[in-house]
Image (cartoon, grey):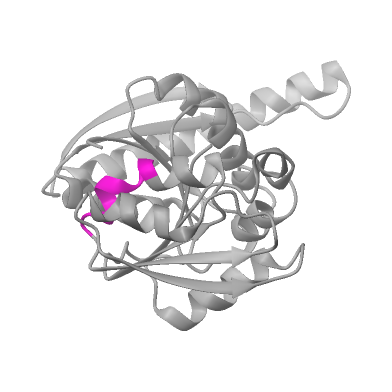
Amino acid sequence: MKNILALMHDDSGQEARYQVALDVTRALEGHLTCLDLTYIPPMTSGIYESAYVMVDLLTQESTREEANRARMKSRLEHEDVSWNWVDVTGDAAQTLRQAATLADLIIVNRRLEDPATIDMRRTASELVVQSGKPVLAVPASCQRLSLDAAMIAWDGSICAAAAMRAAVPLLQKTRHVVLVELQDGLIAAPAEEAASYLSRHGIPTLVERSTCRHGEAGERLIEALGRGGFGYLVMGGFGHARFIEALFGGVTRTMLNKSPVPVFLAH
């Protein structure tokens, strides 16, 4: 994992994305590609009325992003990472997906509170399913990526295994890894198998188990993250078929809405 793709856009989540992207790039001794987006929102009313509104919005957006580009590139020139800058115009998920062909990890936000900005929850969800790349969804309040401790949410599914495998380079840089098996009666592979896999990559892992009823897993994870001082969460889905549904409801929706730490997602 060397090629990091991060969304740059003048919004309330940019600083968190920027700081986490720098931390990941440094930790992995990688290269950071900053995708600066001039965002075009979807047209929502009459064609002609929307066309005039869209031109005005695009002009304002372009002006903001020109200033943002100059400001962020100036900051990057003083950072100790390898980086390049790409300017795009369009939808966040689509442009990131197109730019991610040779990326190893995509960094966006989880849900942002500002309804006027990019729908980051939708963006992260679409990227997880459609890009074929792992996604790190960062809370807007996040100031850095702590590698002191990480939690892996485990249910033995293909998606959970895919997320864990994809996160190995980052987990190898993390001091303490806890694998949490939330037992709801549908565990496909026991946590010990996952722990053995990680041990072969030089990652010692503590296994914890918690029983939960259907629909409780997301809140249980939130509680566990709050207690353990974790720097990030690795998760796939809680069951293969359920994972698709969970992108817009269930566990993944809960984490993209509420997670206090960055969420490493893969499908």
What is the tally of numbered marks visible in this picture? 0
Residue that sits furthest to the bottom in the current view: 227
The magenta stretch spans which residues? 165-173
How far across and down, in percent of the image, does residue 104 sit? 33, 33
Q: Which residue is depicted at the point 36% across and 58% down?
A: 195
- Expressed as whole percent of the image width and height from the top left, the position of residue 160 reads 51, 47
Query: Which one is in front, 11 or 168?
Result: 168
Q: Quadrant of residue 67?
A: top left
Q: Is residue 30 magenta?
A: no
Percent x, y of residue 173: 21, 57
**Taking 213 as reference, is 198 above or below it?**
above
- State the residue at coordinates (67%, 31%): 41
Q: Quadrant of the N terminus?
A: top left
Q: Is residue 208 left or right of residue 35?
A: right
Q: Is residue 172 magenta?
A: yes
Q: Is residue 124 visible?
A: yes
Could you tell me what secondary structure mostly forms the magenta stretch? helix
Q: Residue at x 60, y 59 (%)?
A: 255
Q: Residue furthest top?
A: 48
Residue 227's place in the image compared with 106, above or below, is below
Is 241 placed left or right of 80 in the picture?
right
Q: Nearer the viewer, residue 99 or 186?
A: 186
Residue 27, horizontal then vertical, whole percent? 18, 52
Q: Is residue 117 at least partly visible in the picture?
A: no
Residue 103 higher or lower than 203, as above or below: above
In this rendering, position of residue 236 left or right of residue 3: right
| Front residue of this view, candidates 80 and 76 | 80
